[in-house]
Image (cartoon, rainbow, N blue to C red):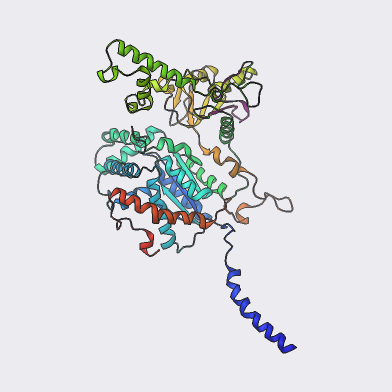
Amino acid sequence: MMRKGRKRQRRQQPAQSALSPLVAAPNPLVPAEFPELVFGLVGPAGADRSMVIEILTKELSALNYRTHVVRLSKMIEKFFGRSYDSIGEDERIGKLMDDGTKIRETTQRGDAVVLLAIAEIRRVREQEFKNKPEKIGYILDSLKHPGEIATLRNVYGQGFQAVSIYSPRDIRVNALAKRIAQSRHVRADGARAKAESLIERDEEEEGKKLGQDVKEAFPEADFFVDGRTRKKMEETKRFVELIFSHPFHTPTVDEYGMYHARSAALRSADLGRQVGAVIATKDGDIIAVGCNEVPKAGGGLYWPGGDEDHRDFQRGNDASVEQREQILAELLNRFRDSGWLAERFRRKSIKDLVQLLLYGAESKVIAKTQILDLLEYGRSVHAEMAALMDAARRGVPVRDATMYCTTFPCHMCTRHIIAAGIDRIVYIEPYPKSRARELYGDSICVDQSAPVKGKVNFDPFVGVAPRQYLRLFEFGVTRKDERGKAIDWKKRGPKPRISRFRNTYQDIETTIVSDVIPVMMKQLGVNENSFPTHSKQGG
């Protein structure tokens, strides 16, 4: 009997040994404890991105993360197999803009350039970090199109953070002019016009949907940093610590106000956009809230679920668009009656001409003209006006208060903001239709290097974006020990708040490298040896 038992035991041992490697293998459903992080910088031309990169690198290193900077300009040069290092700075930037736009327009992808950066991340992980995807931070310098941010979020999820660097235009122009002058060995004042031109193109390329578009990419950030001084840029450290679960970083007054403005915006069912506004005291106490929505009799705005709902989507149309069509029809009718219309258009109906100019083949004729920017015929109360009316209806004074707006105020709202005595405006998104600066330059100050007394200062928002507010400030970790003592964050061992499964984003990277980039290379006639795929590099 004992012999049989021994035999049975010996038979079981090999099976147990064969299973042991499977037991020791990492569980694919358990997220990485110290996952890879990707930071994408959105820095307008002339902004000091190098200092933000330095601070990010330093802070990640303090948390035992290695870093690698991926410069998208170098990826563009590598893709085309050329270098612009030996030419003047203005020419170098201009050629890189040309190449970036060429890649996007030829492929019809707003994210095309950042796909090259994703390929580089994969190469660096394989070749330099030996396929160990933990405790690594990649810094992408820099993003120029909102499509790039959207794709990075889709690929890396919570592991991607967009960081936008604000710097006043005059500071950026001076900095870029100095760099151009040094590269050309001329005086800085002689390079100023070139700097102005490049900065304008960087913000938005006229008439090119897939051109440089920093103006639209900038407000998509997860964190906004003030790039005016080293001290202000050091706030990037706080953002990194929040990502690593720092339990005692709480919202600033501006972060608190802007989050509530964004929350108010979500109430709007406007057919064009959602805008929110909050009026707060200097101490952050919220005193009035508004969003862009249709007003109702008796005061306030329509809510869903009421006895009546006459918001625009219920009516089925945007009144301002209807009025724009009517104005254009009147003009065209006058032009035809006066003989001002070209012969080829005279036989068409006015209705057909309106459709042709607004939505058809001739739309470029009036694209970006002020007739398309008319604001006063919409039925919705603008968010800023709604907030002011909210305060007025309840008898709450707003003099010397701060207004937080998700979007830069239009010129109509600006005049009421000035008249109400609002002291400061904080905004995120630009609003190209606004003529506030031109019409009220005597009373407001926009994009200033420092606050101006006696004027309403319009300040771009700085801090944690509303999109990250809940995730980064939510009580996610223990703040005290069993004795009720506040914990020491550093001693406990900082860990990122995010959860990431490696196989998901790495599989997407592989698809981009093996399937998408080769197609891009064919479309642009690029030699595959200039930007080899990783499988051919031995990865």
Q: Residue at x 53, y 45 (%)?
A: 239
**Range of magenta residues:** 275-296
Q: Residue at x 57, y 67 (%)?
A: 25
Q: Does 152 lie within the magenta span? A: no
Q: Which sits in the foreground, 383 or 479? A: 383
Q: Quadrant of the C terminus?
A: bottom left
478 vs 469, left or right, is right
Q: Residue at x 40, y 51 (%)?
A: 117
Q: Residue at x 63, y 27 (%)?
A: 304
Residue 362 at x, y percent in the picture:
32, 26
Q: Is residue 337 visible?
A: yes
Residue 377 at x, y percent in the picture:
48, 18
389 vs 37, left or right, is right
Residue 350 at x, y percent in the picture:
36, 17
Q: Which sits in the foreground, 314 or 441? A: 314
Q: Quadrant of the N terminus?
A: bottom right
Q: Is residue 443 visible?
A: no
Q: Does 291 lie within the magenta span? A: yes
200 above or below 9?
above
